[in-house]
Image (cartoon, grey):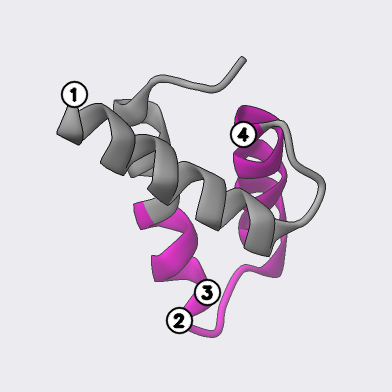
Amino acid sequence: MIAHPDTLRELLTRYEALRDRSGDRQELDDVSYTLCVSTGTRDIRDAVRAARAHIAEVRAA
C-alpha cells in the first residue's frame, strides 16, 4: 500500500527542502524514513522515484 498522493507530495517537498540546505540532519533522516515507509521502499532514491511515479500516475488518471 502506498500513501495518498497529497501526503507524498508534502513529504517530497519537505525532503527536497531539507536536502538542499544544511541544517537539522535528524529531521532529514525522519522525513527520509517516513517517505520510505510511505512508498514501501528501503532506499530514499527508490522512495523518491516511487512517490513521483505514483503522483504522476494519479494525475494521469
Q: Is residue 38 left or right of residue 5?
A: right
Say which residue appears at 54% left-offset and 45% top-offset.
50
Amino acid type indicated by mark 3: Arg
Q: Nearer the viewer, mark 2 or mark 4?
A: 4
Q: Main structural element of the magenta stretch: helix, strand or loop?
A: helix
Query: How many numbered discs?
Result: 4
Q: Secondary structure at mark 1?
A: loop
Magenta-drawn segment:
13-39
Which residue is at the front of the view, 50 or 31?
50
Q: Which residue is mark 3?
A: 19
User: Badge 4: how crowded within 10 Å, few (<14), some, or many (20+)?
Assistant: many
Q: Is residue 7 above or below residue 11?
A: above
Q: Which residue is mark 1?
A: 61
The dot on residue 15 is none
Q: Nearer the viewer, mark 4 or mark 3?
A: 4
Amino acid type indicated by mark 4: Thr
Q: Is residue 36 magenta?
A: yes
The dot on residue 39 is 4
Q: Nearer the viewer, mark 1 or mark 3?
A: 1
Amino acid type indicated by mark 2: Asp
Which residue is at the front of the view, 1 or 57?
57
Q: Earlier in the sequence, mark 2 or mark 4?
A: 2
Q: Is residue 61 left or right of residue 37?
A: left
User: Badge 2: how crowded within 10 Å, few (<14), some, or many (20+)?
Assistant: few
Say which residue appears at 34% left-offset and 41% top-offset.
10
Spot occupied by residue 20 in the image (x, y as percentages of width and height)? 45, 81
Q: Secondary structure at mark 4?
A: helix
Q: Earlier in the sequence, mark 4 or mark 3?
A: 3
